[in-house]
Image (cartoon, rainbow, N blue to C red):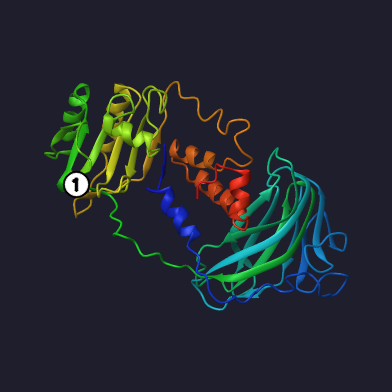
Amino acid sequence: MQQAPWSVVALMVFLFCVQVGAEPKNLCPNPGAEAAGEGNLPAGWRLEGGGERVWATDAAHSGQRSLKITSPGGTTASWLSDLIPLPKPGRRFALSVRAKLANVTGKGGAAIVLYTMGADGKRNGQTAHLTLGGAGNAVAATDWTQYFSVSEPLGEHVKYVCVNLRLYGASGTAWFDDIVLTEFEQYHLKQPRAIRRGLALRNAAIVCSPPLQRHAANLRDALKLDLPIVGDDVHLEQDKRDLIVLGNLTNNRVAERLYLHSYTCEDLNFPGKGGYVLRPLTNPLGFGQNFLVVGASDEVGLGRAIERLAQEKPAADGVLRLPLMVQTGEGYGGLSRYPWPGSGPRREMAHVAAYMKSGDLDHVRKYREEVLKSWFIPDEQLFAEDHSLHL
């Protein structure tokens, strides 16, 4: 079973809250690769790994020079910046790069990342990784494109960072130019109301249709709480209690409403026979209630979901806080045809669908990378090219 935190949306909002202000200082040395250093290399940059690395004049986004990598594959070929001292600990950093790719394919494709270093200058980690294209069997051939990534907060143990531009085991050619590394300033949006996470069991109810009454009673006994059981015709606009919703699209009208708003996925196909989902939702409809969907495709799975939920204990304040829990069952074949052919060049929402049906945070990270690739594309171009970009 895989578990993940309660909300993809919260992660996405956090990514896009960028403060607009004065032009920040670029910390990257020789960001346009125009200044000469020693040994026919650009100042502030050195080589790492294999492949052919050239201080190139055959392509540049601006000026006359760029950082070029050509590799037959099977090795990691990189340009690595000099050590960049951090102004203060605990900050996040934004990395922007212009790149041009020619037939890049294999393993991790073309990528950018920040290496982190301690006081001794030795590497102790990495952050802000972003795949630009060509990973696995994909083939990337692009003109100059701007890419953007954001680091995690860097702790006291990180004194320096280095910008790493690379072909990660991939074959092909990549050019890099106009590298920008700045402190990332987060703008905190004011919430119209405070976000209340978890299920307040002291003021909650179980929602089910008549055929599922037995399971609702079993759940109440398993939780050892005298929770009221209400029908699936409950008025959500008026009932302010937190609600535990049993069932799926076909046998619970509240689950159907959540399903049709794309907050849940549980139906007769997913999670499959004997499978189950525990899906926490934070005020999804805007009426003030939090939901916990105890979902399954059949009654066997619903019984297993109740058994799993009974293992969870509320906190001292009576609030039950759960991650998304998914256990697929017999007959569920996965997202075999998503994205659909001809449905758009990116179909970035495929990663969200995969997360919703697995609870695997790796899909959230992939979604983040896909959306960050579109960061600098004008809205008009996005709307013209890909109706599926929802943010």
- Would you say 237 lies left or right of 62 here? left
Horizontal side, residue 226 vs residue 14: left or right: left
- Residue ID at (58%, 47%): 383
Q: Is residue 310 visible?
A: no
The residue under label 1 is which amino acid type? Answer: Lys
Of 184 and 75, the residue lying toward us: 184
Q: How many marks?
A: 1
Q: Is residue 341 above or below residue 288?
A: above
In the rendering, at what x and y percent does residue 179 appear? Answer: 70, 66
The residue under label 1 is 240
Q: Is residue 384 left or right of residue 187?
A: right
Q: In x, y percent, where is residue 111?
A: 68, 54
**Res 145 quadrant in image:** bottom right
For the N terminus, the image quarter is top left
Q: Quadrant of residue 219?
A: top left
Specify whether residue 345 is in view: yes
In the structure shown, which secondary structural element does the residue marked by tag 1 occupy?
loop
Q: Taking 198 as reference, is 177 above or below it?
A: below
Picture coordinates of residue 304 (x, y %)? 30, 28
Foreground pick, 83 / 55:
55
